[in-house]
Image: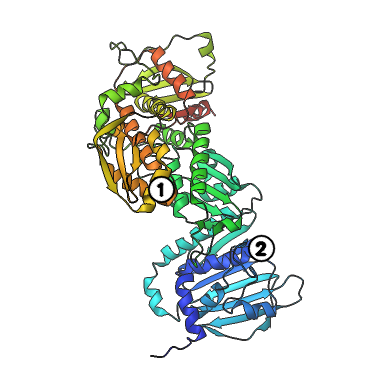
Amino acid sequence: MSVKQLPETLINQIAAGEVIERPASAAKELIENAIDAGATRIEIATAGGGKSLIRITDNGSGMDAADLDLAVRRHCTSKISETLDDIRTLGFRGEALPSIGSVAKLTITSRRNGHSEGSQVAVIGGKMSGVKPAPSNTGTVVEVRDIFFATPARLKFLKTEKAEAGAITEVVKRMAIAFPQIRFVLSGSDRTTLEFPATGDDHLARMAQILGTDFRDNAIEIDAMREDVGLSGFVGVPTFHRGNSAHQYAFVNGRPVQDKLILSALRGAYAESVPSGRYPVAVLSITLDPALVDVNVHPAKSDVRFRDPGLVRGLIVGAIREALHREGDRAATTGTSGMMRAFRPGFQPAQAAPRTPWASASSPSRPLYPQPANDFAEQVQSGFDVLTMPAARADASIAEPAPRTAAEEAPRYRLGAARAQVHENYIVAQTEDGLVIVDQHAAHERLVFEAMRKALDNKRLASQVLLIPEIIDLPEEDCDRLMANATELDRLGLAIERFGPGAVAVRETPAMLGEVDAASMVRDLADEIAEWNTAGGLRGKLEYVAATMACHGSVRSGRRLRPEEMNALLREMEATPGSGTCNHGRPTYIELKLSDIERLFGRS
């Protein structure tokens, strides 16, 4: 069979299979073109979930007749010249318009700024009409009708009109967050009108438009720099979380991306802070030299590849954890809102589950890692001071209020002064402008865990020497990576040595892990180092065991506390970063302002 040149229309349809996966993909490409043209107002109209119509209207710089003639031809663009090392625009491939025109009915009407008349060009199923004069305002109107009519097999893979309309909405939201200085309007017969007025330099105001006003009240600002890589944005306090990752937005040099490295770093930063199955809310923007990131990984341009992924991951994890330590112990305002709803007349609470002992409620029936040996627990215990809780009186259903000192009459502490303990688990404290309710077990669990984690940082962890060193065969490059991190691994209690070109010998393992499959652990570490250039997995396992130890070593629910014990717990919480959540991500306290209480009684 002889080799032959494919027709231009078929080439464009093949390219469209990667560039234009669904109507939302076409909308994304067209919105990017409008932003690159300098538009300050972009209007998007759809019908049939984008399958029948997508119309993008902008007030950008516009195009003249010559530009229109080239714009619908493959690999014609105004955004790059010779190299891909300095891409500063959203679009650059020169494939979107011809790809859309090859599978749909495409019409572009545009007028360049300063010109007296506009021009129009149409591409229907890959066949282009000549450019002709047309009335137009300054800017461009791109209309896409009957998408995939030229490739009907693709229509079978589209979802319902509602789902496709929702995908377009998500595209617009991501663009709106990235460019707060632009006004976006999304309308059509298949949706209610959605408008995002421009907010200028107030990025948090735009985020509140997209994520809700609750995010503004529960957001922590991020601003960090490492080796010319900048990270900015806002993340939610640990107690402000959602049921999926749809509220996590990432941008690289202004480009919305859905990069696995960034999302993985976000999960790592919130480890032990967000409950299992819940997701933090975050908007992260990374800025760096365009030469240090490859945005040409996939035609959809949603994936990127960093030249130094370990640097970017470390920057994200470090900056978020620093911010959480600084402000992350704040109680989410959504907890107060839930409490207010519960107090309103007519509220019907859900059927409460039977109370269970704290250990079975907060611990899995079978731990993921072996329980630590008692002698090691004692060794760690000796390395820090934990809050001790002496036995309390057990002759009252509610603990007696704390004696009021002069300082406590006008509470000067952030978490106030303890006034009572109710149901043998919750501490009620009075603050200067309201009250705080603390879960005593969850709060003390976090305090013990943070103390144990500090112990991990301050000295080499105890290890257990293997009677016979375990020899593990590995590819030579994995051995090289492990030995490059041998010092860090040794601090964590894992002692390894090179054993020939393709093997390592494990001589000691962390005592905290008890009996462990050394071969499996070392192979996992080698894989992690290869992907992220870090050996954080072992530390993650150790911190998991530390969290389990903290849970078993904390003040239990049902324990009656004396007033001085309750106040001591509150003071420790104020001094401990991240004390707003327990190790499992549950809130440790809820705050109710005096103004909220007055509203409940109709006094405001």
Callout 2 secondary element = loop
**Along the horizontal axis of the image, is 564 left or right of 188?**
left
Badge 2: how crowded within 10 Å, few (<14), some, or many (20+)?
many
Q: How far apart, in angstroms, are the residues tagged by discs 1 and 2?
A: 49 Å
Q: How is the image coloured?
A: rainbow
* Residue 427 image position (x, y, % from top left): 39, 21
Residue that carries the numbered disc 2 in the rendered image: 39
Q: Please tell me which residue is depicted at 45% across the width and 50% down the height of the picture.
A: 263
Callout 1 secondary element = helix
Q: Please tell me which residue is depicted at 49% across the width and 87% down the height of the picture.
A: 7
Tell me, yes or no, if residue 93 can be seen here. yes
Tell me, yes or no, if residue 173 can be seen here. no
* Residue 157 image position (x, y, % from top left): 37, 71
Number of dots carrying numbers: 2
Q: Earlier in the sequence, mark 1 or mark 2?
A: 2
The disc placed on residue 240 is: none
Q: Nearer the viewer, mark 1 or mark 2?
A: 1
Q: Please tell me which residue is depicted at 56% across the width and 45% down the height of the picture.
A: 233
Q: Quadrant of residue 351?
A: top left
Badge 1: how crowded within 10 Å, few (<14), some, or many (20+)?
some
Q: Quadrant of residue 72?
A: bottom right
| Quarter that holds the C terminus | top right
Task: Decide: is 212 above or below 388.
Answer: below
Q: Amino acid at mark 1?
A: Arg
Q: Please tell me which residue is depicted at 66% across the width and 74% down the height of the picture.
A: 110
Residue that carries the numbered disc 1 in the rendered image: 481
**Along the horizontal axis of the image, is 208 left or right of 524?**
right
Task: Decide: is 190 above or below 280.
Answer: below
Q: Amino acid at mark 2?
A: Ala
